[in-house]
Structure formats: structure tokens, C-alpha cells
Image (spheres, helix red, strand yellow):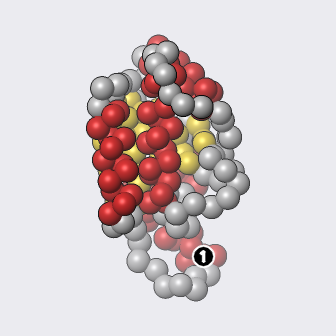
Amino acid sequence: MNISIITIGKLKEKYLKQGIDEYLKRLSAYAKLDIIELADEKAPENLSETEMEIVKEKEGERILSKISDDTHVIALAIEGKMKTSEQLAKEIDQLATYGKSKIAIIIGGSLGLSQQVMKRANDTLSFSKMTFPHQLMRLILLEQVYRAFRINRGEPYHK
């Protein structure tokens, strides 16, 4: 299985990089995983609604340029579907079973995802109704993907 994490913004925090590297190493036994970092759109602090949409559209174009037609897309969004770890594991297993070997999981920038990206998504996922920094979300996401593979293989993992 090929999994791409497509994310807006560069990761700068050393402690998050260390955690992400650890999960990338662990996941290498289960799947080919790539993290695609895309530039965030520079914008002033106080944006109008129209300016926010323009920023999301530009970031969305960058995201969509990295997704092939045969890729199953999961968009992370606060309004997405909340799932248990077991439900996410089952979804990943079913995708593999039914020939969907390419998965892209999208983490948007600070303003969220464009309507075009949301339309392209085959599914949405929410980890919480709370807002998390998208850099931290990478680490949380990788941990859950790792957990999903462990669950699917019947391997032990703490609950």
C-alpha cells in the first residue's frame, strides 16, 4: 500500500520531527509512506472572507496537483467523520482488499481546505471538534495509521 500525507506548511519543531521520524520508521514494515510538504500561502493576520477563500484555493490547487486520479483521498477536517482507531483500521484494510493501493490523506493549512479539495475527497476524517496545529496533526495521524496496521495484523498495541 502507498500512503501519501499531503500537508500545507513546513515542519520546524525538532521534537515533532523526531516523533514523525519514529513513526515513519515503524510504518516502513507495513506500507510505503511519503510526506509531501507544500508551501503555505503567505497572508496577513486579518483576512476578509474573500481573501481567506483565495488563500485556501491557492493551497488547494497545490494539493490537487499532487493527487492522481486513482488515489483514494481522505481529507482531515473538523467537520469530518469521527472514527475509532478500529474503524480507521477497518477502512484501511477494506481499501487494500478492494484494490485501492494509493491513499492520500490531506492536512490543510491554518485556514482549512478549499471546496475543490473537499469535493475531490472520497472521505473525511476528524480527530476531534477541537483545532490542532497542523504540524502536531501529522504526528497524531501517523500514530493512528501505525496503530491501524498493528490492529489489522493482530499485533499487540496498547489501548
Residue 71 figure quarter:
top left
Residue at 66% over, 35% down? 83
| Nearer to me, 14 or 53 | 14
Q: Which quarter shows the N terminus? A: top left
Q: Residue type at mark 1: give it.
A: Thr
Query: Quick check: 72 left or right of 66?
Result: right
Element type at mark 1: helix
| Residue on which the image places disc 1 | 50
| Residue 64 vertical placement versus 90 (above, below) | below
Categorize mark 1 by other alpha carbons within 10 Å: few (<14), some (14-19), many (20+): few
Residue at 29% over, 31% down? 28
- Measured from the top left, where is residue 135 in percent x and y? 44, 60
- Measured from the top left, where is residue 107 in percent x and y? 48, 53
Residue 85 figure quarter:
top right
| Residue 152 vertical placement versus 74 (above, below) | above
Residue at 49% over, 85% down? 44
Query: Quick check: 149 left or right of 119?
Result: left
Residue 3 seen in this snapshot: yes
Residue at 36% over, 60% down? 15
- Measured from the top left, where is residue 150 in percent x and y? 46, 24
| Residue 110 vertical placement versus 4 (above, below) | below
Give the total of numbered labels: 1
- Measured from the top left, where is residue 81 in percent x and y? 68, 40
Q: Which quarter shows the C terminus? A: top right
